Each structure stands twice: as C-alpha cells, then as structure tokens.
Amino acid sequence: MLQSRALTAAAYGEKEFLLHIPEGQNISQAIQEQLQQAQHIRFALLSFQPGYLESGVCHTAPPDSAGKFIVKYGAGHEFGPCVLLAGDAVLGEDQYGLPLVHCHGCLIEQSSQTTFGGHLDLSRCVVGKQGLSVQVLVTAEIGFVAKKDSTSQMHVFHPSVVSVEARA
C-alpha cells in the first residue's frame, strides 16, 4: 500500500535568517554546529547562495538496474576548486534521531567549467574563498525525520509533527 509523505500544518515558518559559513569549514559540520549549538535548531529548509568551494562531491542517482531500489547513488564525482551555483537542503534527523542534512545542487568545476548536478555530499564539501551564505527557514510545527518508506524500501525524510517540548 502506498503511503503519502505529505503533511499539512497550520503554521510552517518560525523564523528566517542568513547563516554564514567561513572559508575552510566543512559545510555539513558547520551547519549542524551553528544551528544546533547556537540556535538549538533541529529542523530547517536551507537554500545556498552561489559561492566558492575548495572541494565538493556530487552524486547522481540513476535507477537501480537490479530493480531493488528506485535509485542508488553512485560513487560521486569529486571536484577540486569549484563554484556552488545552487543548492537546496533539508535539515532533519536520521532514523536514530541524529542530525541529517540532505542536499541537491549544482557545481561548476573551475578549471574545466564542467557543470554537474545531483546529490551534494555536504560532509565532503569544504567552503572556499569569501565563505558561503545559506538562507535558513526554521520550521515551527513540522520536522523531517528519516523513516523507512514502504514504496522505495529506503530511509527517506518524512514530515512529522514536532511538539514544542520536542524542539526545546
């Protein structure tokens, strides 16, 4: 039986602000540390402004030829200096309650000007010169938690109602 991952909530936006990640920092680690420690934020929508990266990793997800999974990420394309042209992400929790950032975006390799888009492995992306800015929309009553999806048999984000107590 198919189950929807849609959830309707009366209020979805709590606050919005611009986050800056300094040069040389790992994107995933910086987001998690800055939002969790300083703001106690567990759930948010993230939109990256264009910026330079020292290094980046991007994966595509072609259909699984064996038919076991809907998609299966490949090994990843590693970039040296590149430009993050665009990227959107969700900050949520994995199936164990730990922070998880899932991002799709587009990178341009600086020397060859090759463009590549797909899943960005933010744990392997390092911010370059001038830092990187991220627009953050904190969700008030809904969060995103990885749960096993009955359709794909993969752990994917599902929206979940989050009580005020659970967000504190």
Image (cartoon, grey):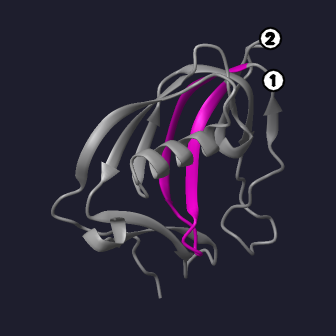
Q: SS class of the residue under badge 1? A: loop
Provide the residue designation for mark 2: 111
Q: Residues within 10 Å of mark 1 (few under 14, many from 20)?
A: some
Within the magenta stretch, is there residue 139?
no
> Is 12 positioned to the left or the right of 27 in the image?
left
Q: Looking at the image, which residue is at 58% across and 66% down?
A: 98
Location of residue 139 in the rendering, given as x and y in whole percent from the top left corner = 31, 54
Above or below residue 77? Residue 99 is below
Instruction: Pick the residue in front: 133 or 103.
Output: 133
Residue that appears at 34% across and 65% down: 168
Return the x and y of residue 41 as percentages of the image width and height. 40, 53
Residue on which disc 1 sits: 80
User: Which dot, 2 or 1, sits closer to the camera?
Assistant: 1
Is 92 located above or below residue 153 in the figure? above
Q: Nearer the viewer, residue 29 or 64?
A: 29
- Residue 21 image point, x, y percent: 55, 29
Q: Can residue 121 be seen here?
A: no
Mark count:
2
Report helix, strand or loop for mark 2.
Answer: loop
- State yes or no: discs 2 and 1 in contact (Cβ < 8 Å): yes
Q: Which residues are magenta?
A: 82-107
The mark nearer the N terminus, 2 or 1, is 1
Amino acid carrying label 2: it is Ser
In the picture provided, is 148 more to the left or to the right than 5? right
114 and 139: which is toward the camera: 139
Residue with the most extreme left position: 10
Q: Residue furthest front?
A: 38
Q: Quadrant of residue 77?
A: top right
Magenta segment's dominant SS is strand
What's the CA distance linking mark 2 and mark 1?
A: 9 Å
